[in-house]
């Protein structure tokens, strides 16, 4: 197994480089609102942006049709966030699986995830593009049973770095780099590139593209996938969205998927 500490250090150096580049080439801007261009509702950002400085709770369902034979996965989960202060965000997820990947129908809790996101700097580049730098870490606690085909059999940590870029057109781009490694159980070493694009559609609708390209160092595979999300804010506090998912490349873990979400904004 490759030493995961080296890749954690690399991500740390990248985080520092992004931080200092922002300080060197941009002016300070203390306004934390409106990083998604035109407002969707009120004065809040779109919570589909993981780097948005907002508090919310989403109740979600996703279905994946597996690339391996006739197996399928129904995933039910809660995905929420709480702003502890203007520069520190706490996220949480709780996942429940219903799947037949083991050959029989099985249901159980799959994982609990907590994430801290720190926003060390934000401002406006000389070109006029607003930005927000983020660094943080995921802790993934495995609750599953691999004999049931649920979970990965290991707890993980995943440090990451990213930046949100709000263009004048209203489009927000969020590139992220993250490395996952096990802290017990099954050997896991995955470095993932992720690109999110969010575009407001009028005053209430939004469209999101979320592409993930992970490299699995243990299995030498690239199980990439992409998600398209179309949502609408029904009121200032409630939103609904639908998702389409597709596995990419010969190493994909599933062919296609769909999802629904109900969002509560605070």
Image (cartoon, grey):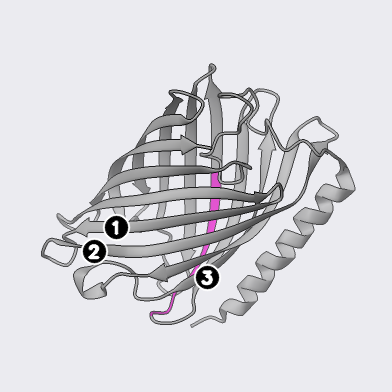
Q: Are marks 1 and 3 in contact (CB under 8 Å)?
A: no
Around disc 2, counting alpha carbons within 10 Å, would you say few (fewer than 14), some (14 to 19), or many (20 or more)? Answer: some
Q: Position of residue 17 (x, y in %)?
A: 78, 59
249 lies above or below 146: above
Secondary structure category for the residue under label 3:
strand
Q: Position of residue 50 (x, y in %)?
A: 56, 46
Q: Position of residue 143 (x, y in %)?
A: 33, 70
Q: Is residue 112 magenta?
A: no
Q: Are marks 2 and 3 in contact (CB under 8 Å)?
A: no
Q: Which residue is mark 2?
A: 108
**Main secondary structure found in the magenta portion:** strand
Q: Which residue is mark 3?
A: 157
Q: Is residue 187 magenta?
A: yes
* Residue segment shown in magenta: 186-195
Around disc 3, counting alpha carbons within 10 Å, would you say few (fewer than 14), some (14 to 19), or many (20 or more)? Answer: some
Depth check, front residue: 135 or 25 = 135
Horizontal side, residue 255 vs residue 212: left or right: left
**Which of the labelled discs sits on residue 96, or is there none?**
1
Residue 68 seen in render: no
Considering every residue shown, the one lying at the far top of the view is: 202
The Cα–Cα distance between marks 2 and 1, rounded to whole angstroms, is: 6 Å
Q: Are marks 2 and 1 in contact (CB under 8 Å)?
A: yes
Which quadrant holds residue 4? bottom right
160 lies above or below 199: below
2 or 1: tag closer to the N-terminus: 1
1 or 3: tag closer to the N-terminus: 1
Closer mark to the observer between disc 1 and disc 3? 1
2 or 3: tag closer to the N-terminus: 2
């Amino acid at each position: 197994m490759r030493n995961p500490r080296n890749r954690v250090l690399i991500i740390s150096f990248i985080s520092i480089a992004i931080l200092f580049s922002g300080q060197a080439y941009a002016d300070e801007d203390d306004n934390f609102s409106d990083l998604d261009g035109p407002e969707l509702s009120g004065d809040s950002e779109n919570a589909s942006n993981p780097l948005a400085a907002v508090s919310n709770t989403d109740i979600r369902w996703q279905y994946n049709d597996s690339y391996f034979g006739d197996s399928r996965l129904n995933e039910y989960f809660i995905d929420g966030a709480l702003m502890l202060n203007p520069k520190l965000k706490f996220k949480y997820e709780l996942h429940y699986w219903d799947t037949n990947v083991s050959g029989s129908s099985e249901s159980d809790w799959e994982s609990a995830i907590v994430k801290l996101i720190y926003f060390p700097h934000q401002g406006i580049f000389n070109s006029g593009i607003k930005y927000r730098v983020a660094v943080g870490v995921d802790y993934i606690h495995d609750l599953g049973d691999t004999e049931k085909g649920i979970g990965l059999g290991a707890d993980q940590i995943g440090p990451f770095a990213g930046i949100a870029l709000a263009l004048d057109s209203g489009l927000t781009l969020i590139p992220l780099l993250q490395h996952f490694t096990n802290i017990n159980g099954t050997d896991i070493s995955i470095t993932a590139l992720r690109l999110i694009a969010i575009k407001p559609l009028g005053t209430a609708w939004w469209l999101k593209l979320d592409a993930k390209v992970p490299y699995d160092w243990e299995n030498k595979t690239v199980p990439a996938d992409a998600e398209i999300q179309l949502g609408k804010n029904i009121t200032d506090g409630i939103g609904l969205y639908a998702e389409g998912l597709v596995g990419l490349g010969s190493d994909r873990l599933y062919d296609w998927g769909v999802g629904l979400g109900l969002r509560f904004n605070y």
